[in-house]
Amino acid sequence: MAMQRITGFANAKPWETLTLLLLLVLVVAAGCVRAADDEQMRHGGGDGGRKMMRRRAADMTVPITILNSAVDRGAVCIDGTPPAYHLDTGSGAGNRSWVINLEGGGWCNDAMACRYRNGSRLGSSDHMERRVFFTGIMSAAPADNPDFYSWNRVKIRYCDGASFAGDTYNEALGLHFRGQRIWEAIIEHLLDAGMASAEQVLLTGCSAGGLAAILHCDQLRALLPDAATTVKCLSDGGLFLDAVDVAGARSLRSYYDGVVALHGVAPNLPKTCTDHLDATSCFFPQNIIDSIKTPIFLLNAAYDAWQIEESLAPNAADPSGAWQACKSNHLACNASQLQFLQGFRDQMVAAVRDFSESSRNGLFINSCFVHCQSETTATWNNAAGVSPALQNKGIAKSVGDWYFGRAEVKAIDCPYPCDNTCHNDI
Ligand SMILES: *[C@@H]1O[C@H](CO)[C@@H](O)[C@H](O)[C@H]1NC(C)=O
Ligand SMILES: *[C@@H]1O[C@H](CO)[C@@H](O)[C@H](O)[C@H]1NC(C)=O
Ligand SMILES: *[C@@H]1O[C@H](CO)[C@@H](O)[C@H](O)[C@H]1NC(C)=O
């Protein structure tokens, strides 16, 4: 099961390991900064500017809230612990607007993979970081996040393993698959905490969270009591395609078969899809985006690094290792491999064709080798102007223009190699 590699730290993807290490370093650094600040305050020393900067770095982390009251309604992580979220309260003009971010982190498709999650942050709030960094679209800094910095920003932690869409208890395994209940419990809690009177809401997420943002977009619209509230959804790196791999099989479809069946996902998928397609098909965005009524923005790399590694050329489909070099560095791909990857881009462009015809939707499909671009400063909105761009417009500006109706954004890049603004993962 090649895809289980993404479920464990021991076998984490290079960028997951890097991100994790970076986060650890940053969290430790923030801890030191906070200690240093406290030290400075106690001794009344230090220069004001430096102190301000340190204070700002420390304040970029947001504490966890464990929602104990959700347990009564069976909304629990895989191991039965309560679900959790992080909220950075809005201010000023953003006071009645909300960004809701669904955390990503792969899925679990069988007993072994889900048991592994049971003892990790992706399956238990006992194992989650107590503070997380809010960067990119979650940032509170106006320069980094000009359109959403003052909004209430919430990160909902991912601990169910099926993009917040399962709803069952597995007696034999003793594991809870209650993603759908976690989604509902936390959204209802946030409604009580002020979101019910929101003027604007943006549901977002990357990877498995980007898929979740698509799956729950119309559900969020329905949960908001005031029809005057603007609700829109941004899926980052969530356009997982039902594609044929390098061995001629459909690796990701087989994997999703396991996720959908084990977690009891079917009843929570859009009926407009399940009334004519099997449940696994309806877990693929390409089969549901055309019938979602709430406006959606699809932000995705045409050569999605995760999909190349885990869906197109997973180890099981590449026993000879012929794709190893190419899938870890796009510059090492030979002509026939590049041709295969161009075929994948063609499928992605075809998958969004009807979706793109609706004036309410937005698109940013850049020809890069990356997975997730909205949650890091470098790709979302680097102040130095070296972030990915299409038609000279960066990602933060593109998403903002679409959200606020300042301009239509339907940007699809020309095929590789034609984009020198990429931040490639591979
Ligand atoms: C899951 O984790 C809980 C809490 O740590 C533990 O009690 C339980 O035995 C674990 N279940 C499995 C199947 O590993
Ligand atoms: C918005 O600000 C007002 C006062 O300025 C406050 O009463 C209210 O609770 C705030 N709303 C939210 C959702 O934070
Ligand atoms: C390119 O890589 C493929 C494996 O994907 C291999 O079969 C083929 O021989 C290579 N072509 C060249 C020209 O090296």
Image: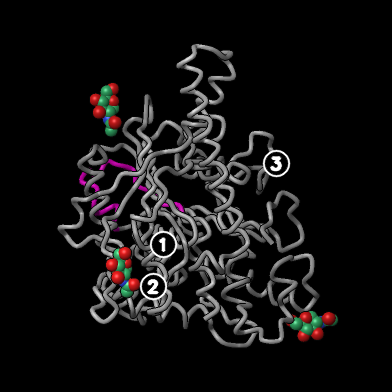
Which residue is drawn at the image coordinates 59% and 41% (left, top)? 377
Mark nearer the viewer, 1 or 3: 1
Residue 81 picture location, percent across and down: 27, 59
Of the image marks 1 and 3, the number of the one nearer the N terminus: 1
> Magenta span has 221?
yes
Question: Is 391 located above or below residue 32 in the figure?
Answer: below
Residue 202 visible in the current orientation: no
Span shown in magenta: 219-234
Which residue is drawn at the image coordinates 49% and 45% (left, top)? 402
Question: Is 268 located above or below residue 40 in the figure?
Answer: below
* Residue at the disc numbered 2: 114
Residue 321 picture location, percent across and down: 71, 81
* Residue at the disc numbered 3: 386
* Residue at the disc numbered 1: 120
Which residue is drawn at the image coordinates 45% and 39% (left, top)? 404
CB atoms of marks 2 and 1 within 8 Å: no
> Magenta span has 322?
no
